[in-house]
Image (spheres, grey):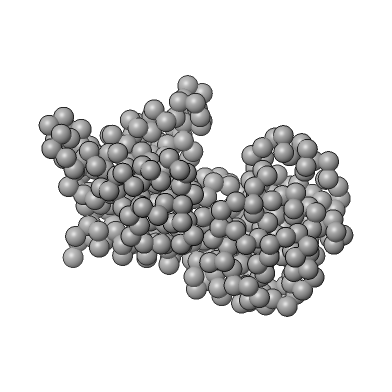
Amino acid sequence: MAKPKIAILASNLYPIPPRATAAAELIVSQITEGLVKRGFPVTLYTAGDAKTRARLVSVTKRASIRDPKIGMENHKAYEYIQTSNAYRDAAKWGAKVMLSHVPMVSAHFAAFARSPFAYAQGVSGRAKFPTVALLHSPPTFTDSAVMASAPAQKYISISNNQRKLAKDAKFIATIYHGVDTRSLRFQPNAGTYLAFLGRIRDYKGVAEAIATAQTLRMPLKIAGPIGDADYFARLVKPKLSKQIQYVGEITHSQKSAFLGQAMATLFPIGWEEPFGLVIPESLACGTPVIAFKRGSVPELLRDGKTGYIVKTVPQMIAAVRKIMRIKRLTCRREAERHYSVDRMVDDYARLLTKLSK
């Protein structure tokens, strides 16, 4: 039986796949390439410099962030142009389902595309396929209003906790992100330092990680892009030393060594993060995680088995002191069983096939 044609709509702001820290673009690439590998005809709608084996349709030659004429300030306009073009092209191509990674944009087009007005205007060729959108971030108050008012589009959450902020949206599945357990190599022996991997800004908890390491007099290695220069200058840079090191942004190929050679990964987040990708990445390397009880953490981490879930810096300090009780092989097996890219792609393949009928 022939597999259904799948249209995948992504932002054209950042390159796909990303070179380093960009979780959304990484997931877009993994899903797209995974579906192609499984024999699905796939068209990817994103910037023209994307690297993919899928059919690629673009309205910009390169990612908007790389184009000085577009950049961050003007990329939204091109995102709307791209979405309009995607629905028109997908209808002509014969797509059976659209997977959107720009939910607040496609919400409006999903409704319009199936209306007689769209056919009359020739905007979409009157698309007969459903749209399902993947939420990469916590929905804002405005996002929730849009989701509730656009019933033509259904939604996929990346954690159950994420749904709490959009109770009126039509969620049809929760699919956890996957990580590449092949490239993230298992390290059976614990290192001597603590690791922090993530964007450098207040709600990511870098200052709390530093306070933990300083109290314990343990080395801390910090990796990730600087998302808030003022925060870095005030609360991170003055603390840097031989003990507290900032190694900059690292690539995906460097994550195995960075996470795998650590004693533990610290994840003291201060916001409702929908899916902390660094948790399964660390577990895949065999390194347990100590995380604050926020967002999806209780769904992703088994307290006392793959790390510890805490609420304060003093509790995080106490957890580090007993971290050697956690078996690194248990962490690795947890990642292989629940958070592999293959499991994630299989989940999307089943859901999209079902929606296409």
Question: Is the N terminus in the top left, top right, bottom left or bottom right quadrant?
Answer: bottom left
Q: Position of residue 325 (x, y in %)?
A: 73, 78
Looking at the image, which is closer to me, 231 or 127? Answer: 231
Looking at the image, which is closer to me, 138 or 191? Answer: 138
Question: Is the C terminus in the top left, top right, bottom left or bottom right quadrant?
Answer: bottom left
Left or right of residue 263, residue 199 in this image = left
Q: Quadrant of residue 320?
A: bottom right
Q: Is residue 16 visible?
A: no
Q: Residue at x 66, y 62 (%)?
A: 291
Q: Residue at x 46, y 52 (%)?
A: 165
Q: Quadrant of residue 356?
A: bottom left
- Residue 342's place in the image compared with 356, above or below, is below
Q: Residue at x 69, y 76 (%)?
A: 326
- Residue 310's place in the image compared with 220, above or below, is below
Q: Position of residue 44 (x, y in %)?
A: 34, 45
Looking at the image, which is closer to me, 160 or 327? Answer: 160
Q: Quadrant of residue 331?
A: bottom right
Looking at the image, which is closer to me, 319 or 123? Answer: 319
Q: Position of residue 9 (x, y in %)?
A: 35, 44
